[in-house]
Amino acid sequence: MKYEKIDSSLFIANRKRFVSEMKPGSIAIFHSNYEYVWNGDAVYDFKQNSDIFWLSGIDQEDSILVLFPDCPIEEFRETLFLKQTNEHIAVWEGHKYTKTEAFETSGIASVFWNHEFNDKIRPVINMAEYIYLTLNENDRYTYRSPYKALDFAKELKEIYPLHKYERAAPILQRLRSIKSEQELELTRRAISISKKGFERILKFVKPGVMEYEIEAELIHEYIRNRANGHSFHPIVASGESACVLHYVENNRPCKDGDVLLVDCGVDYANYASDMTRVMPVNGKFTPRQKEVYNAVLRVMREARKLLVPGTYLMEYHQVVGEIMEKELVDLGVLSMHDIQTQDPNWPAYKKYFMHGTSHFMGVDVHDVGMRYEPMQAGMVFTCEPGIYIQEESIGIRLENDILLTNNGPHDLMDEVSMPLEAEEIEEIMNSSVNA
């Protein structure tokens, strides 16, 4: 791994929180993700399953975590099954965890090789009454391809049909959404690297630069600061492309007079940051561009105030929409007639602001959480309003990462003085030109 070693106390504490929510007489089993084939004998870069990482810190393919706190055999109360290395694997794939390294990473002393799993787990499972399994229950997920957790659940229910099965996901969604101080420090590290990437591109962007060159500048800065890479595919969208919410082609030239929207994030130690900024390609916003920019900034600041414990996410989105509505009227793109005759199921403001304002963030950039339960202190949300005026080729979105506390919202990007004001952006871009 590129990132610095994480203290195992984080994962020990996470497991303690999880097993305290299990029913007596229960076993829980977690698998790493598949390595997916790209083409031929090539595979995509491996990304660990977020649940097994959150519970163990193990960041390697073909790994299994077993938790059985009531097991009468002590070595199976917490157990890892890992890929056993050999000379061939060492030469062709590189280093894999030793048992000692797995213990140092996870705090789990009982480590076996994964080819032993089926033989060792059978008598252990038969001591349990309940089996906890996890599936991808992120409410943004759309099933398009097989994944290990689902395949394993089907396989296990065929072999052990008489056990009672429980869903681990609701427990993990609630636990993972409340961040410990160690987790927040990892998020802060991701955000600090994100700032370095942003300042790098502010000094790089100019008319004629290609969007993919900007993407390359970002990944250069991320990797050189020990990040795994992007926390999601970056959006580098100039001109009219900034009005396409999930534009990822990043293949157009940045033109004089256009604004450039960059939505990007850092994956540091599997913890994500998420940031959106907009800059004028030539270093100077037009009066209209700045007018729209400042409208979005005002909405972001008002929305941020609402990110407090007790808030319901869906109600929050509705209130932010009402704040946005006034700004759009003041900008002259919405009229009172538009509002008075709007479809209540799709308010008029959604023509120019069609997405939500905030989402959970943590191990995943779109992290798990209970969307219909009140927000709590310790949660981290993005705050990202936007205005997209296609007829003017202006797309403005601004996004920061906010920690909820009992003393009000705390902007994690303010901690690193992430540039945000339009004048800040212009000053940095023009100082690099004159340097």
Image: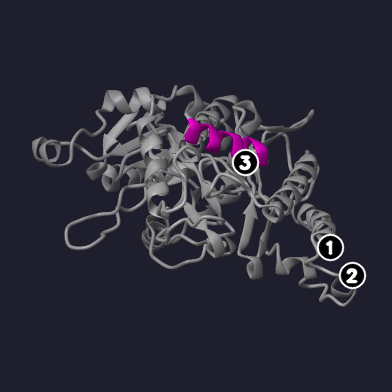
Q: How is the image coloured?
A: one colour
Viewer-proximal residue among 43 and 134: 43
Circles 1 and 2, Cβ within 8 Å, touching? The answer is yes
Marks 2/3: CA–CA distance: 39 Å
Marks 1/2: CA–CA distance: 7 Å
In the image: residue 348, left or right of residue 97: right
Viewer-proximal residue among 22 and 108: 108
In the image: residue 237, left or right of residue 42: right
Q: Position of residue 243 (x, y in %)?
A: 59, 63
Image-quadrant location for residue 218: top left
Which mark identifies residue 336?
2
Above or below, 284 relative to 372: above
Image-quadrant location for residue 346: bottom right
Tag 2 secondary structure: helix
Q: Which residue is labeled 1 in the image? A: 329
> Magenta residues?
422-434
Which mark identifies residue 247?
none
